[in-house]
């Protein structure tokens, strides 16, 4: 989709600059925008169990967030290195940037020797077509370096740094996301208990989300390029989806990461167990077939996520709900409010 | 430094330009020492000099993969080191261009395509089997969508790549006991010097540059060999996967 067709005006104040806890709310007390087939409803996230039916299946991302932002220095001076995606034991795709609020590109050449979190790194090559992202080879253990001196990646709209725990969801089990799979953040032990009590099942997969800076700070026209992310759909989850479908239940993806993994895993109309990297782009150009509902955050204009929402829920319905969300002062971004979107009929 | 303790070694054929050069660049960046071959000696020397930016040891051996002499020189160079981690059979020929219908190719021309695209790669694996076994190495044979497409005028090249695909799968089974993995990669459409001879200027300009396959090569190098052996990958697909 072109950037202009993904435009709307989101007032600058409507972004969460802190966590709901900082605003005096429990995680599950954020608001929940519900886009039904013909109308929009306004609820709290903890009402979710009442909005689903017994026999429905929630699919969640169990990827845990890494303290992926490292202090770094090289011939260009001091900068931050935000690790995005692990390609191998010593190989990472990463984004060098000047600071939280100031993106790169930081000038780099393959002969440079840089150091991040105490580990020497060799730049390999830029990601094709995205000069802000580079592949690096580490002469040391970056997992240790993150534990020692890493912090969660954040962008300029947040008022202050937060602890890593603020960036973990209740489902977090497999470390690997450079940024929090935030759709799962409002879930609490209470919500999970209420869901179980109502007969709503949960299945897990993981997709490690990379840096979103190209979405946060678009560099040019059109939606930002989408790059590959590692994921796994386990066989139990593929089976649970098949069974839910047979029994007439609905599949609800918790997050755009989950819908991306499930659509990639579809073969002959069925979700198959698979592990790999996906660069599948989701939008209005191709039908969605894996899920009936999407639980997600509120997405900014001119992002690939918004294109996904338009494709999944229909542009008219999403725009109508977003107009109400703006009127009622919903909050955008990873610590903001939530949105349950049912697929276009 | 620990990284110096063992430097992996790779052989790349057809490394003087296009995809071969891109693969060599990725490998040098990942810390591999390299033995490179290509028919065009001066171009190969230029690639070697450019790759010295990374502190890799790069040896350039000019020659043709159909020449047993070149294959022996490669094997001799590899023997001087402690085993071979990776062999990339990238050198290939389209045969006469503009491309011709299968029956318009003279039998000698067809044989020459097979010598370069099929016999050369298999013979090189044969020469390098022992050093590959030492390192439980990986063989990557470059394929093409022409191997499955049946496109008119691509029959000679396509049949040689289809045969190479089957050789890759067979070798994956036959060399498993040696701990050697074999995989086949269709790199997808690219703007390479090889392709320039087969397409109109307009078609050629629309093809992505060969460095669009860089993320795939880096992904492949990070995979455990038992997850990729006997597989055929599409480097520009929206999904690179193995069964969970």
Image (tube, rainbow, N blue to C red):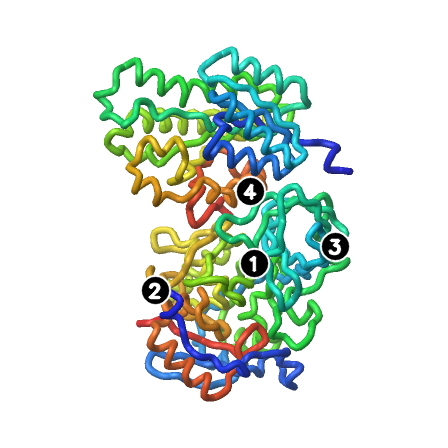
At 50% from the left and 68% from the top, the residue drawn is A254
Task: Judge whether residue A217 can be spotted in this image.
Answer: yes
| Residue A270 spot, x, y in % from top left | 38, 55
Label drawn at residue A284? 2
Using the numbered discs, state the Cα–Cα distance from disc 3 to disc 1 in whole angstroms.
19 Å
Res. A240 in view: no
Which residue carries the number 1 mark? A210
Badges 1 and 2, same chain? yes
Q: Label 2: how many residues lie within 10 Å, few (<14), some (14-19) or many (20+)?
A: some
Residue A158 figure quarter: bottom right
The residue where tag 4 is placed is B218
Depth check: B57 or B237 in front?
B57
Whether callout 4 and callout 1 share a subunit is answered no
For the residue labelled by badge 1, is the local secondary structure a helix, a strand or a loop?
loop
Question: Disc 2: which chain?
Answer: A
Q: Are marks 4 and 1 in contact (CB under 8 Å)?
A: no
Quadrant (top left, top right, bottom left, bottom right) of the C terminus of chain A? bottom left
**Mark in the foreground, 3 or 2:** 3
In depth, the one of A274 and A194 nearer the eye is A274
Q: Which quadrant holds residue B226?
A: top right
**What subunit carries mark 1?**
A
N-term mark: 1 or 2:
1
Q: CA distance from mark 4 to mark 2?
A: 31 Å
Residue beneath the point at 68% across and 53% down: A76
């Amino acid at each position: 989709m072109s950037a202009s067709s993904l435009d709307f005006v989101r007032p600058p104040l409507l972004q969460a600059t802190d966590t709901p806890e900082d605003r005096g709310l429990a995680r599950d007390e954020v608001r929940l925008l519900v886009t039904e087939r013909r109308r929009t409803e306004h609820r709290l996230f903890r009402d979710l169990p009442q909005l689903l039916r017994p026999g429905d299946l929630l699919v969640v991302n169990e990827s845990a967030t890494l303290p992926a932002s490292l202090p770094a220095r090289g011939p260009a001076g001091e900068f931050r290195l935000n690790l995005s995606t692990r390609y191998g034991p010593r190989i990472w795709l990463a984004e060098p940037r000047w600071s939280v609020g100031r993106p790169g590109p930081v000038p780099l050449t393959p002969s440079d020797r840089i150091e991040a979190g105490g580990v020497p790194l060799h730049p390999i090559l830029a990601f094709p077509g995205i000069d802000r992202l580079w592949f690096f080879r580490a002469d040391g253990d970056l997992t240790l370096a993150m534990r020692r001196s890493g912090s969660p990646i954040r962008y300029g709209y947040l008022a202050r740094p937060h602890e890593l725990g603020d960036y973990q969801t209740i489902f977090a089990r497999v470390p690997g996301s450079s940024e929090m799979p935030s759709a799962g953040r409002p879930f609490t032990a209470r919500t999970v208990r209420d869901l179980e009590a109502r007969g709503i099942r949960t299945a897990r997969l993981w997709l490690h989300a990379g840096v979103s800076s190209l979405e946060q700070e678009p560099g040019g026209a059109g939606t930002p390029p989408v790059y590959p992310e590692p994921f796994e759909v386990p066989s139990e989850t593929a089976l649970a989806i098949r069974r839910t479908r047979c029994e007439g239940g609905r599949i609800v993806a918790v997050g755009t990461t989950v819908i991306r993994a499930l659509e990639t895993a579809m073969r002959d109309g069925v979700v198959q167990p698979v592990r790999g990297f996906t660069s599948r782009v989701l939008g209005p150009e191709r039908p969605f077939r894996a899920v009936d509902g999407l639980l997600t955050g509120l997405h900014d204009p001119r992002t690939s996520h918004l294109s996904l929402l338009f494709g999944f829920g229909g542009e008219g319905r999403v725009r109508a709900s977003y107009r109400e969300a703006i009127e009622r002062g919903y909050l955008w971004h990873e610590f903001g409010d939530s949105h349950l979107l049912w697929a276009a009929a | 430094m620990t990284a110096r303790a063992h430097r992996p070694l790779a052989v790349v054929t057809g490394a003087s330009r296009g995809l071969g050069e891109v693969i060599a660049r990725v490998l040098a960046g990942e810390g591999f020492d390299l033995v490179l071959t290509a028919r065009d000696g001066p171009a190969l020397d230029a690639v070697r000099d450019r790759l010295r930016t990374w502190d890799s040891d790069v040896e350039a051996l000019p020659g043709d993969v159909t020449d047993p002499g070149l294959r022996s020189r490669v094997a001799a160079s590899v023997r001087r080191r402690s085993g071979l981690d990776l062999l990339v059979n990238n050198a290939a020929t389209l045969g006469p261009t503009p491309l011709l219908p299968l029956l318009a190719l003279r039998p000698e021309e067809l044989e020459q395509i097979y010598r370069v695209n099929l016999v050369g790669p298999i013979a090189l694996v044969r020469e390098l089997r022992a050093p590959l076994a030492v390192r439980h190495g990986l063989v990557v044979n470059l394929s093409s969508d022409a191997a499955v497409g049946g496109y008119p005028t691509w029959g000679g090249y396509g049949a040689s790549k289809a045969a190479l695909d089957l050789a890759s799968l067979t070798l994956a089974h036959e060399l498993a006991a040696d701990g050697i993995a074999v995989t086949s990669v269709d790199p997808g459409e690219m703007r390479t010097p090889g392709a320039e001879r087969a397409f109109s200027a307009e078609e050629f300009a629309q093809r992505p540059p060969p460095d669009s396959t860089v993320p795939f090569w880096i992904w492949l190098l990070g995979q455990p060999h038992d997850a990729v052996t006997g597989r055929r990958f599409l480097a520009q697909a929206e999904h690179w996967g193995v069964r969970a």
